[in-house]
Image (tube, helix red, strand yellow):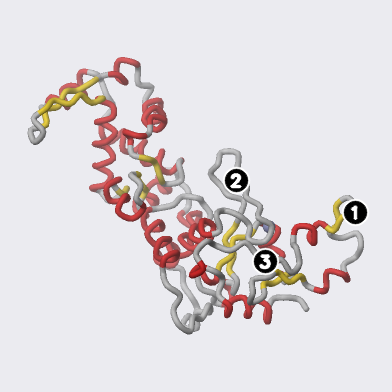
Amino acid sequence: MSLENELMVKFDMPSKEEVSDVLLKTLFKHNGIIKEFNSNENIVKEIADEFNLNERQLTAQIEIYYKKEDRIKRSSLWNRLLYRSGSYLAKEKLVSHPTQTQKITNRKEWMLTEKGYDQVLSTLKIPLSKKDSLQVKSYEVQKEQIIISETEIPNNYNPIDSSSKRKTATKKSSIRKRAFRYAVIENYQKKCAICGLSLHSPDNKIWEVQASHIVPHSQNGKDDIWNGLALCHLHHWAFDVGWFTILPDYKIMISPKITSLNPNIGYMSGVSFFEQITKDNSRIILPDNPNNYPHKRAIEWHKANVFCT
Ligand SMILES: [Zn+2]
């Protein structure tokens, strides 16, 4: 038995498999991403608490001789165990290793893979269909998000997927759908493009802002950044029902129908609430990168097909 394993037994540490199970669930709890253990004391403590580790177990150290550097390094036994469990999960392709994740995000993080995500959902008895509504970002979704955000606009871009007859939900389309959501929300810096509202849940996990399609999915609108717009719940609804649209110069146009509303509708303390937060003729808040602005063909389609004149 290696010295490390001997110490694990001596300090009555949990097994690698037990720690791996908790690590997967912890990743799920943290929306699929946690920083590597060395720079993340909170996670190290959080997982330790799941096992009720005592002070002696938490402070146990191991001395390891590094041949290459010809020196002895002291490490925490618990950190070693966490790292070994993470590496084991990475080998099983249930998580991505920080060195792998760093290549695409420049951040050293453990991320759940789609396979790991499916496994946690099945352990927690959550139906796989919930994937689209949960806020967990998998490694594959992260990769796809980068593709969505960094692809150059093709010539003659068409926001409508004319190739699709009746689209069936596939693994690939589910990843694309979730990646679209993150790409749009993050490109608009988690703000509504119309009113600028940026708000998250008390636990900081769920953003109020939604990724809306300019040409909706029901009309075969594509999951591309050029067919997306980050909108608060109210503006998402109002955009989908045609209360306002966006002009080719990115200015907001409110439907003239607004004046025909019953005077009891849409008012708060005597002020027209909707008009107050939807400034007619003002420019929407756009992403930093002009390549990712909404495409003119998408917004023209919305004005012609959804907007109420
Ligand atoms: Zn808004």
Check residue 283 in the rendering and tell me which mark sits there, or answer none.
3
Residue picked out by circle 2: 200
Q: Nearer the viewer, mark 2 or mark 3?
A: 3
Q: Secondary structure at mark 3?
A: loop
Which residue is outermost to the top? 56
Q: Nearer the viewer, mark 3 or mark 1?
A: 3
- Residue 238 drawn above or below residue 93: below
Classify the position of the N terminus by image quarter. Answer: top left
Q: Earlier in the sequence, mark 2 or mark 3?
A: 2
Q: Residue at image x 25%, y 48%?
A: 92
**Residue 42 placement (x, y as % from top left):** 42, 30
Q: Residue at image x 62%, y 47%?
A: 199
> Which of the two residues, 107 or 213, is positioned nearer the viewer here?
107
Classify the position of the C terminus by image quarter. Answer: bottom right
**Residue 232 placement (x, y as % from top left):** 65, 56
Residue picked out by circle 1: 270
Q: Residues within 10 Å of mark 2 (few under 14, many from 20)?
A: few
